[in-house]
Structure formats: structure tokens, C-alpha cells
Image (spheres, helix red, strand yellow):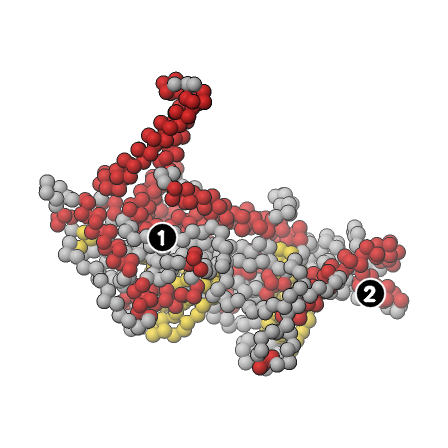
Amino acid sequence: MAAVRVSKCTRTNPLRATGSPRVTIRRNLATRAGGNGTTTVVEAKKERKPSPLTGGGTLDGEKALGKDPASATKAKNMGSDLASSTFSDSRWVQGTWDLTQFTGSDGNTDWDAVIDAEMERRRILEENPTPSSLKEKVLFDTAIVPWWAWVRRFHLPEAEKINGRAAMVGYFMALVIDGLTGTGLWDQQNSFLGKVALNIAVIGIMFIGSTKDLDKFKGLWSEATFYDDQWNASWTGVERPEDDE
Amino acid sequence: MQCGTRATSVKVGSASATKKVAGSRKAVVMCPGLYQGNHQRVSVSSRGGVLSSWASGGRREVGVRAVIQDGAKLDRPLRVAIIGGGPAGACAAEECAKNGCETYMIERKMDNCKPCGGAIPLCMIDEFDLPPEIIDRQVNRMKMISPSNREVDIGSTLKPNEYIGMTRREVLDDYLRQRAEKYGTNVINGLFMGMEQKEGEKGPWTLSINNYGEGATSKGDKAREKMELEVDVVVGADGATSRVAKIIDAGDYDYAIAYQERIRIDQERMKFYENLAEMYVGDDVSPDFYGWVFPKYDHVGVGTGTVINKPAIKQYQDAIRDRAGDKITGGKIIKIEAHPIPEHPRPKRIEGRVALVGDAAGYVTKCSGEGIYFAAKSGRMCGEAIAQRSNQGQRMIGERDLRVYLNKWDRKYWPTYKVLDILQKVFYRSNAAREAFVEMCQSEYVQRMTFDSYLYKTVVPGNPINDIKLLFGTIASILRANALRVTNGPSVTFGERKEA
């Protein structure tokens, strides 16, 4: 337990002109004194109860950046009426994208345009949330866009970069192993360890494509097990009773 | 913390008192029923008490102001005090009283109208024998609304006899309390002020209570007498701001602030919510929780909650009202309420002969924020453990006996809590994840699994092939939703939070 603290009201508060300590502090003093057998006055500190809005997991400072409600809501509260760019698009018909209006040059649906339109719609709604309405239900399901459209649009540009990195890392590792063990490139492929190293290099680059991904994975393990730790906190140092007890 | 003081003062003194213990043991043996079984240490003050009463020639009343070791046989029923008369407290009291313990339940506000969704699962009606009059509405349709207003209706997989019961907390709590009283609980309408152990760790707890008398409400009542009550075992069922938890140093937990406005809307709009509840997800409504519109008996409750950005709760409330749109237009706000909701169990849930149950222990699930059923069940489990381990109130119990309840609880409900935790971590991270969440809810398999596990409180394993399809579907949904996100909106993590 913390060391004994004796707190006196150091504020010049007219209501506390007598300078008598607060009730809560007095209790502290009594218990701590009994506990240690000695009374050490460490420091004079103001103990103010934290408001319920600041405790219990509320983020502060840097971590709270960008977690506020939508800017439109905030603006409304401050009285201003943002000339909000509400979403309106002629191709949005009855709650979904009208695919007939997205035909590309070759007569098939231009999925890239559909994806672009949906991205824009979501961006507008994120900044200016609109009320949900029974008359204008949203029914668009992203699953109607075929998988190859997603791959071509989002994965392929990345794939080039990732393949390049995997190739360079692989080649460099092969050089290093060659220098250390004298095994040439072909011989490395034939050995089991060589194959393992190759797989690690390729799959490793797939997951850790850039340094940003490293940070992502660092927090993942602690996040996955944090809840378990909280539940087991009552059992630290105590044996669980046998189930038949 | 005064009980700690007493214990430590005993420890300090016992080094010199050990020699005297042997001598006092003789005196002890002469008072049958006072001490039995194996005891290593006699508290200094009670030793003095015994000797002084011996010296004065009178024998003190056995069982009063006496240190009794765990497992010792009692010649009077075990005295249990339950602080708090909500679902957790009432169910604990019922179990204890039913099984022969002398039970006291202390509740400060008998007509407490709690700010709560009021939803109870189907299994609670069976397990706790609730009469059908308690249920105001049977909700069997739910609407999930994504950040981009994509709506998904769920509930088509429910059988005709399956529903989520919406109750009025004051009605439900009152029913459970009256039942506890029927089984022999002494209900004290008063405010629990504090408690201490005057005779060391194994001594009784002396509670200080401001007794309000019969049928009083907590505010503005003049009849207030201070009373002291001595009991052996204390169960803390006094909710999220538990005083018992503070006294035993149970530690703090993260909590969400849930804010709700009760809005009376016109008949026609009320018909829309006849048996439908809505759940809105989005950064505008809450960065790490959801907003809701739940029907109550003649009005709707519109609210939201958050852990990480509590000061902005009113803005989130504005946002949910906006998003509900013309479904609640013209409604009149009749009440505003807010309350903390624990996010996870407290670090310490049992100390000596004091146990925490319900919200006081922190038994609220993640993702959905459900707490009524778990409060009632944990109260019941704790009461059962006390009754069983004390042999229907004939033996003193100790921490090990109370931990039997804790162990049983952890083992039985850990999977449920963990699954909901995983759901929250995956789907409440960002707007993209929430879009994926709502998309996944379309699938009938997901709906069936969700409702089965919610209504019956068991983690249903399900078909492995469908599970794998679900896994791939989830990953695909999340990837698509993330791809469609242009700006990097706020995203949250659910790991350890170090507050500034």
C-alpha cells in the first residue's frame, strides 16, 4: 500500500478557513497510522475525487485524437449549420446503385466506377451522418461486386510492391546463407532448411509488408489476452478449488 | 479501511501475544461452542473480551462478538447480509433465506426506476420462474443499422415462442425482492454507509446503515435512524458504484457511460416499434459501443454509450436522435438518465467473507452490454454456494467456500464472455468493421447462432462447415469494407489502456 499521506487543505478557500482536513483524508490518516505502527508525513496533496466522466477508461491526450463524434454533429451543437454536402447521386436509385448506369466501354459493368461511387458515398456519410429513413432504405450489398474486381483494384497494385520486396529479401537471405555456409543457390533449394527459409521470407513479407504492419501486430497479442487477464485477476496467487469440492 | 487496521494491529501484537495464546486457550475451552476446531491465533481484543467477561463472572452471549474460524459449527444460523436489492441481491437473498441462513437485504430505494434497456433473455424467464405479467413487450425483430444506413432485419429465424422480453426494471426488481422476502429475508429499507470488522479477519462484520423505515424513498425522508447490524458474511450486490467493493479494496474497472432519453412518440410511430428494437452502429453514434432505440411500455428509450470518450456523450446522443430520424420525430423527452456500466470484472471479487455479485463485480458482457441475467445468476450462484458450503447455515464459511461460487461462475460463463469480447474487438473497431458486421448479420446462419446463444446463454458449437464459410465470409466482408474506406476514420483498440 502507498505510504501514509497527510493532506491538508492548501487552497485558500473561504469555506475552509479553519483549515481542517477533509473527512476522507482523516480516515486515511487513521488507518495508515494503525497499519504501519508509525506515522510518516510524506507530502501535502490535494485529493479531489475524479469526475465519473474522466475515469474508467476514458482516453486522454494523444490517444483521444480523432475519436470525437462526426464533425457535422459537433458543428450543429455549436450552432453553425454546415453547408453539408449531403449525398445525392443520380445513379443511386431506391437504396442501391443502379448497375445499368455503370456500363463501361465494352458493355459490361464498370466495377471500378461502382467501387468509386460507393467510396464517395461512404465518405460523405461519415462526415455528415444522415438520418435513417424508412422511405429511403439503403439496400446496397458490397458482395454483388465480384471478387476479381476487388482483387484487380486493391490487391494488384499492392501485389507488385509486395512481390518485389519478397524477391529482394529472398535474394539477400540466399546471399547471406551462401556466404555463411558455402551452399549455392540451387543447393539451398534442395535442403529442407532452405525451403523453410524461403517460405518464411515469402509469407513473412505478405504479413509484414511494411513497417506500419509491425506496430499493428505488436498490440495484437496483448489485446487478445487482455480480457483473459482481467478475468483471472481474482485468482492471482490463489488456487482454484477442485471441481468436486 | 478499518477492517484492515484491526487485522494488522492484531498481527503486530500477536508476536508478543503468542505466548499468552496458550494460556488463553484453557479459558477458551471452558466456553463450549465459542471456539471449536483448529485455531492458531486468537485476536487480542476478543481474548481480552473473553477473559474480562470471565473475570466479571458473566458468560457473554455465545456467537455475538466472537471470532469463529471457517468451518466451525454454529449453534445459531449463519448471518448473511446482502447489500443491494436489485436482481443480484434479491436472488442471492432468496437462496440464502431458502436454505436456513439468517438473511438481511439492504436496499435504499424500493421503487428505483433504473436506467436500463430492460431486456431479458428467454432462459431467465424459465430459470427464475418469472410470471408473464412482468414482460411488457416481446421483441422478436431487431434492426441493425450500419454507419452508411444499411439496414438489416434480424429475427426471421426465431421460432414463434422465442422472443427477447422487455421489462420495466422497477417491476422486475420488485417482484424478485418480494419473492426473497417471502422466503424469509429481512428486508431493510436503508442506505448502507459502511462496515468494519471489529475483531479481526475472522470476526463478524458490523454494518452501519441509515434505516429509512418502511416504504420510504431515499430522498426527502425524515425518518432516518442509524442502525448497526452484525453479520458473518456480506454479499456486495450494490451495483456499478459499489461501496462494498471500495471497502474491500476490490480495485477499479473501466466502465462505459450509458445515456438514455425516454421519448414519448405518437401512437402510429409507436406501432412501428411494437415488437422491434433497433441498434445503430457508427462513429457518430459511439466510437466503441452502439446506439439503440428500445421500446418500453408506452414510450421508447433512445440512448447510446461509450467508454473512451465519455465527455462527448451528449453529442453522441444528439447523433443517435438524428439518425433515428423521422421514426421519432415529434417525440417528447420525458426522462433523461445515465449510469455507468462496467466493462470487465474487478481485479478482486472476493475478500475474506465478502463476495461481490452482479454489476458490483463487473459481470456485464462486452459487445451487447447485457447485465440483468448475469447479475441474477451470479447472485443465485453465490447464495447457493453459501447455503451449500455452510450446510444450510449451520457452519461458518470462509473465503475458500465463497471462491467455489467464483470458480463455478468463471467456468460456466467464461466462453460466453470471451466470444462477445472477440466480437467487440473485431467488429467495433472502426466504421469499416461495423459495416462488415451489419453485412454479416444478413446471413441466416449468423442470426440463428446469435439468437441461440443470446436466448439460452450457451455457446452453441454449430456446424463446422458453416463455421468455416462464416469465417471466410467475415474476412471477405471486412476486407471489402476496409477497402471502401477513403479517409482513415477513428479506429479503436481494446487492449490495455493507460490513461493520461
Q: What residue lies at 33% left-to-right and 54% top-to-bottom? A: B489
Q: Position of residue A95 (x, y in %)?
A: 21, 55
- Dot 1 falls on a residue whose secondary structure is loop
Residue identified by numbered label 1: B430
Query: In this rendering, is residue A186 above or below B478?
Result: above
Viewer-nearest residue: A213 or B368: A213
Residue at image point 29% right, 58% down: A126
User: Which element type, helix, strand or loop, lies under badge 2?
Assistant: helix
Residue at image position (50%, 71%) is: B112
Report if residue B388 is visible in the image: no
Q: Look at the picture and state if B403 lies above or below B286.
A: above
Question: Mark number for residue B182?
Answer: none
The type of residue carrying mark 1 is Ser
The residue that disc 2 covers is B49
In the image, residue B271 above or below residue B448: below
Labels 1 and 2: the sequence-earlier one: 2
| Amino acid at pointer 2 | Gly
Q: Where is residue A231 in the image (x, y as percent from the top left)?
A: 54, 50
Q: Where is residue A140 in the image (x, y as percent from the top left)?
A: 23, 51
Chain letter of the residue carrying label 1? B
The answer to which of B263 and A25 lies nearer the viewer is A25
Q: Is B435 left, or right, of B179 in this rendering?
A: left
> Counting other residues with Cα less than 10 Å from the Cα at mark 1, is it few (<14), some (14-19), or many (20 or more)?
many
Give the image quarter of residue A163. Answer: top left
**Quadrant the N terminus of chain B occupies:** bottom right
